[in-house]
Image (cartoon, grey):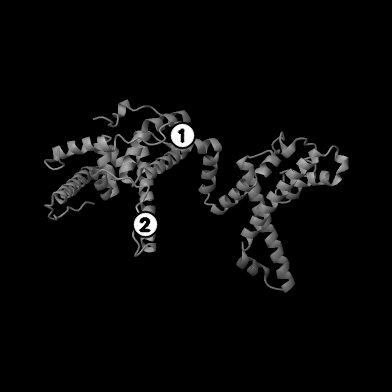
């Protein structure tokens, strides 16, 4: 049958050919367990991504990726991969950077005798990206170091032989507590006896 | 018609927000969405990507889904929008590639499989017209369902289908004439 002829003939030909050529196509993942939405919802990314992108905070998402991707050790150290908690930490870092920049600018303006409000408005969030990035990296390094310290501490027979390590162990989250209040403090990490922080309880939420 | 959409009273019932129901919906409609997107897009990989993107978007909106149209029609609407966005991005990328490769022979695209002439000609139609033909003649959708899936007024469906069929028939006839060496260009009816 050729595709020429009356409209009715052509429609019948079209239906038959579509079923033959396209209708027989089978995609590679027909089972729901193979679907991308299942994987995304299982890992929590679906909800997380929609929440973040819904606010239009692409930069925020980038920082989240930096934290999430670079801090397996940090998650192990805190015992928490809770995205809400991670988000809270990033928000804290951002706020801390804003405060820091504002304070620095104010002090510089006062020293130079310029109009602080006008200068601050002009600067606004200048340099905040670098500050947040540095904050994230510092936090990751700190946690990696802390995890390493924990491992080292556990290899030693007695804490009394390494007082410096004991201090470091307590410093881990405490160092970040200025940027992330409520995320832990000195002494919180004491008494963890397993390498890499395994067996820790999730960080208590305020 | 084999593979036609079920009448509305026979539609399986889905509860908005139910993950279990969404899984059922996925398994019931995946192949049909894939078939539609195969026609609208260039290759199977793109069709698969867009189907998965469709279900991702639909899953996010699933708690808010309202059963004013069959769930498959709603999915088709999302899928066609995803495919249109994909085609736009693809055209931009191709334009850049053409500029980059000016004066150089084009490499064959390894992801592009040789398509049946009908599929090739459907892809050459305006995408919504091609989609309308597939929804009617492959899936058996009513005018109302096609209108819902395409996001256009129901009263325009009949004329859109007729114009798309006429253009497709003409193009296929010309292909035959080219093959047989008797081709004489004709005036192609314009379609909106």
Counting the numbered discs, the total is 2
Across and down, in percent, residue B44 comes to 36, 42
| Residue B130 numbered mark, or none | none
Residue with the mark numbered 2: B94
Which quadrant holds residue A14? top left
Report the residue at 83% width, 39% height from top. A156
Across and down, in percent, residue B183 comes to 13, 53
Report the residue at 28% width, 47% height from top. B123
Q: In this view of the protein, can residue B142 be seen by the observer?
A: no
Chain ID, mark 2: B
Same chain letter for marks 1 and 2: no
Across and down, in percent, residue B46 comes to 38, 45
Q: In this view of the protein, can residue A198 be seen by the observer?
A: yes
Judged from the image, the secondary structure of the residue bearing numbered disc 2 is: helix
Name the residue nearer the viewer: B60 or B82: B82
In three-dimensional space, the C-alpha distance between marks 1 and 2, rounded to whole angstroms, equals 31 Å
Judged from the image, the secondary structure of the residue bearing numbered disc 1 is: helix
Report the residue at 54% width, 35% height from top. A42
Dot 2, crowdedness within 10 Å: few (<14), some or many (≥20)?
A: few
Task: Point out the image quarter for the N terminus of chain B.
Answer: top left
Chain ID, mark 1: A
Which quadrant holds residue A118? bottom right
Residue farthest along the bottom direction in this orientation: A113
Residue with the mark numbered 1: A34
Left or right: where A102 falls relative to A19: right
Name the residue nearer the viewer: A113 or A153: A153
Across and down, in percent, residue A36 comes to 47, 38
Asked if marks 1 and 2 touch (Cβ < 8 Å), the reply is no
Residue farthest along the right direction in this orientation: A160
Left or right: where B9 falls relative to A96: left
């Amino acid at each position: 049958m050729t595709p020429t002829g009356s409209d009715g003939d052509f429609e019948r030909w079209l239906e038959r050919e579509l079923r033959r050529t396209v209708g027989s196509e089978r995609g590679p993942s027909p089972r729901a367990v193979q679907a991308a939405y299942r994987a995304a919802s299982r890992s929590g990314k679906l909800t997380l991504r929609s929440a973040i992108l819904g606010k239009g905070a692409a930069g925020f998402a980038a920082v989240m990726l930096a934290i999430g991707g670079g801090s397996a050790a940090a998650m192990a150290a805190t015992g928490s991969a809770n995205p809400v908690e991670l988000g809270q930490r990033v928000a804290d870092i951002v706020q801390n950077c804003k405060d820091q920049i504002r304070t620095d600018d104010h002090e510089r303006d006062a020293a130079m005798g310029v109009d602080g409000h006008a200068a601050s408005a002009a600067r606004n969030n200048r340099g905040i990206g670098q500050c947040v990035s540095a904050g994230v990296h510092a936090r990751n390094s700190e946690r990696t170091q802390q995890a390493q310290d924990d491992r080292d501490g556990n290899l030693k027979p007695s804490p009394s032989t390494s007082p410096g390590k004991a201090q470091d162990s307590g410093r881990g989250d405490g160092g970040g507590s200025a940027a992330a209040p409520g995320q832990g403090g000195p002494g919180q990490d004491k008494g963890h006896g397993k390498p890499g922080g395994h067996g820790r309880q999730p960080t208590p939420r305020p | 018609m084999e593979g036609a959409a079920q009448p509305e009273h026979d539609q399986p019932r889905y509860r908005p927000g139910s993950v279990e129901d969404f899984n059922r919906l996925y398994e019931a409609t995946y192949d049909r969405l894939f078939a539609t997107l195969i026609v609208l897009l260039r290759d199977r990989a793109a069709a698969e990507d867009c189907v998965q993107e469709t279900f991702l978007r639909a899953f996010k909106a699933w708690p808010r889904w309202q059963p004013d149209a069959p769930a498959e029609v709603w999915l088709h609407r999302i899928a066609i929008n995803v495919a249109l966005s994909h085609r736009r991005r693809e055209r931009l990328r191709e334009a850049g590639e053409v500029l980059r490769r000016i004066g150089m022979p084009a490499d064959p695209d390894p992801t592009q499989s040789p398509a049946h002439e009908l599929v090739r000609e459907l892809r050459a139609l305006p995408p919504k017209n091609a989609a309308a033909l597939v929804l009617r003649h492959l899936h058996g959708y009513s005018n109302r369902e096609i209108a819902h899936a395409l996001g256009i007024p129901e009263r325009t469906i009949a004329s859109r289908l007729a114009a798309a069929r006429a253009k497709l028939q003409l193009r296929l006839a010309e292909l035959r004439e080219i093959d047989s060496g008797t081709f004489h260009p004709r005036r192609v009816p314009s379609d909106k």
